[in-house]
Image (cartoon, rainbow, N blue to C red):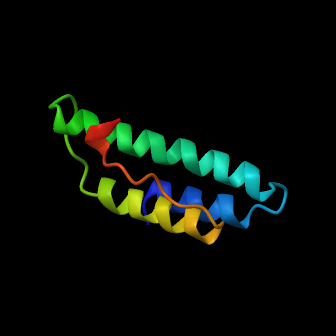
Amino acid sequence: MSHIKRRIVTILSDEQMDDDQKVAVLRQLEADSLSKERSATEGMTPVDGDDGEDLKSIEQALRKLGQQPVTAGAASL
């Protein structure tokens, strides 16, 4: 399990955080993941094989909390 997936599980199971706080943390992870993908497409960093899977996991977690993931791809940020 990747670091991001472990972090998502921790966030979703944290009973001290309300859903709004969880969404805020997940949105930051989503933005970071999209930024990493964008920089990889621009040749700034190598593509990590788990990047796409991490983003899918973040999107699934957001949906569990009743939120929609960002619809635009990494290149549109």
At 32% from the left and 53% from the top, the residue drawn is 51
Going by the picture, which residue comes out furthest to the left?
A: 43
Residue at position x 66%, y 66% in the image: 65
Closest to the observer, 3 or 12? 12
Residue 58 in picture, x, y percent from top left: 49, 59
Q: Which quadrant: the N terminus?
A: bottom left
For this rendering, which residue is in front, 61 or 7? 61
Residue 47 lies, with reference to residue 56, above or below; the image says: above
Residue in the picture at 37% in, 43% down: 34
In this picture, is 57 found above or below 47?
Answer: below
Can you name the residue that lies furthest to the right here? 16
Q: Quadrant of residue 41?
A: top left
Rendered position, 5 above or below 77: below
Image position, residue 27 (x, y; %) = 56, 47
* Count of all numbered marks drawn on residues in the image: 0
| On-image quarter of the C terminus | top left
